[in-house]
Image (cartoon, rainbow, N blue to C red):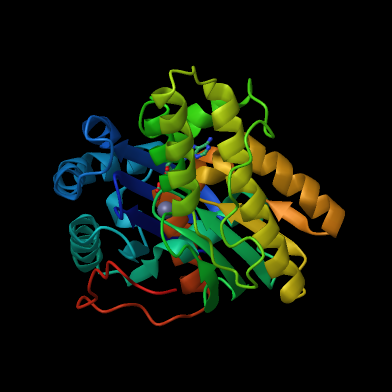
Amino acid sequence: TDEPLVLGIETSCDETGIGIVRGHTLLANTIASSMDEHARYGGVVPEVASRAHLEAMTPTVEAALAEAGLKFSDIDAVAVTAGPGLAGALLVGVAAAKSYALGLGVPLYGVNHLAAHVAVDQLEHGPLPKPCIAMLVSGGHSSLLLVPDVAEDVISLGSTVDDAAGEAFDKVARVLGLPFPGGPHIDRAARDGARAAIAFPRGKIDDGTLDFSFSGLKTAVARWVEAREASGESIHVPDVAASFQEAVVDVLTRKALQACRKYDVHDLLIGGGVAANSRLRALAQERCDAAGVRLRVPRPGLCTDNGAMVAALGSDLVAAGVTPSTLEIPADSSLPV
Ligand code: KG4
Ligand code: ZN
């Protein structure tokens, strides 16, 4: 085909992700993660992440080219996450993308990380319905978006007013003595627990907004555990995990379907690391079926931060004829959608 080959670069957090696509065909998706270096701090350390991106950039790009069986000179456009994310981490990706675009003499596209999380689903499930509602839930963001057109028009409907959903998973996991990042561990522990064992609060559930709040829930779990420990009672971790998880996914799915109803949209996309959660997937499917909404969730490797999502959005921008970015484009840690 004569669709352009797009290289995508993602460095907004701890993952150095490089993707190569042609149109919506995924040719390579390579990742280097510095998570092992952050785990002992119980959270991502920005300075450590930036340094790791710098070290990983060239080898990860070379691995992607090798995976796709391509040469550098085959690349027709470069897309990079310009924000939101960790400022120093973003800077490494943006600087690399500028050098590659300049050296190759190809257009550069600075893209929004959240829009890229939406665009990536097309690599697996084909073109996005227009419009769709997207819910992005990860360690760094929890957002509801109305997406008339991912390349041109993405509208924020609501987001967390405090912790992100994944952050709540990670903090509660710490309270329960589970390793970081805690989401997958809570998911696993919850399988042996009772979802209704403990009635934890559902923040903002019927407040009429499409915003989220998870810090009250996190505090409620911590208090509950502290109270049991203080009185010498033992804690059944699976019950706490299942009850906490149910509170999160109940709110997420209710708000997502409220958004679908409010905007009369019948397609819901869920992305971000928390979209890997088995209970979120199951409850979302159940509630979408009941509401006549079609659900799209990319496979886990495309839900977590990666370069393919940036390449996918870059490809859409090329196809839509959007004007490329200049070499002056900044990394913007709080870039709005
Ligand atoms: O998208 P991601 O890889 O990175 C960003 O935060 O941008 O998301 C990571 C987050 C972490 O908070 C992790 O605990 C959470 O996603 N996570 C999960 C699951 N797998 C990853 N949360 C709940 N259940 C899971 N199965
Ligand atoms: Zn992300």
Return the residue found at the far front. 231
Q: Is residue 299 above or below residue 120?
A: above
For the question of whether residue 90 can be seen, the reply is yes
Q: Position of residue 9 (x, y in %)?
A: 33, 55
Give the residue displayed 38% in from the left and 68% down from the top. Answer: 111
Taking 132 as reference, is 180 above or below it?
above
Up/down of 38 relative to 270, above or below? above
**How many numbered marks, from 0 up?**
0
Residues 219 and 169: in front is 219
166 horizontally vs 118: left or right: left
Q: Residue 41: which quarter of the image? A: top left
Residue 16, quarter of picture: top left
In the picture, measured across the screen, residue 331 lies left or right of residue 310, that is left
State the image quarter where residue 65 is shown.
top left
Which residue is at 44% across, 73% downward? 337
**On-image quarter of the N terminus:** bottom right
**Residue 27 appears anywhere in the view:** no
| Image location (x, y in percent) of residue 308 | 45, 51
Which x, y percent locates residue 52? Answer: 18, 42
User: Compared with residue 258, is residue 163 higher up or lower down, i.e. above or below?
Assistant: above
Q: Residue at x 57, y 69 (%)?
A: 145
Q: Position of residue 38 (x, y in %)?
A: 24, 36
Front residue of 270 and 255:
255
Q: Nearer the viewer, residue 204 or 116?
A: 204
In this rendering, would 81 be left or right of 186?
left
